Amino acid sequence: IALVRCHTPCLVHGILASRWAHRLREYPVLVVNTGYLPGEVVFSLRGIGDVDLIGLLRERLGPEEHLGGIIGYGHRGATGGRFPRERLGEFLEKMGVG
């Protein structure tokens, strides 16, 4: 998984994830934005090809783990979520990028 971190009040995490997924075709791209919602992290996960990203989230986090937020909406090729900011380190560690 390729990680891109940003801190902006702008809704850019989905666009960044899509653009980087096209450049880094062999990796799912995870973009975390710590500045969009106060006290929360929002993220987008994108990939190119036949990668089930919701399945990847469930594999890494466990089927019931939502980190106190909403995780795994979207579809197999584009997903994301949000959770409390204090859980960012745990999320990155479980995703294998922290």
Image (cartoon, rainbow, N blue to C red):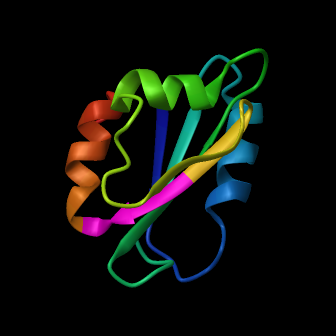
Task: Classify residue 77 by image quadrant.
Answer: top right
Q: Nearer the viewer, residue 2 or 79?
A: 79
What residue is shown at x 79% (from left), y 18% (from top)?
A: 49
Q: Is residue 54 magenta?
A: no
74 or 95, which is in the foreground? 74
Q: Quadrant of residue 34?
A: bottom left
The structure residue drawn at horizontal position 75% and vertical position 46%, both measured from the top left corner, is: 19
Residue 11, position in %: x, y? 65, 73
Q: Is residue 64 above or below residue 80?
A: above
Q: Residue at x 31, y 67 (%)?
A: 84
Give the side of residue 95 with respect to residue 18, left or right.
Answer: left
Residue depicted at x 47% and y 61%: 82
Quarter of the rendering containing residue 23: top right
Q: Residue 74's x, y, as percent?
A: 71, 46
Q: Is residue 3 above or below residue 44?
A: above
Residue 97 percent coordinates (x, y): 33, 33
Judged by its main secondary structure, the magenta piece is strand
- The region drawn magenta spans 81-85
Total of numbered circles in the picture?
0
As drawn, 40 above or below 1: below
Instruction: Look at the image and tell me whether residue 80 can be seen.
Output: yes
Specify whether 82 is left or right of 78: left
With 62 as the anchor, is 17 left or right in this view?
Answer: right
Query: Taking the image as drawn, is residue 1 in sight?
Result: no
Q: Position of residue 67 (x, y in %)?
A: 31, 52
The quarter of the picture where the C terminus appears is top left
23 with respect to 42 (left or right): right
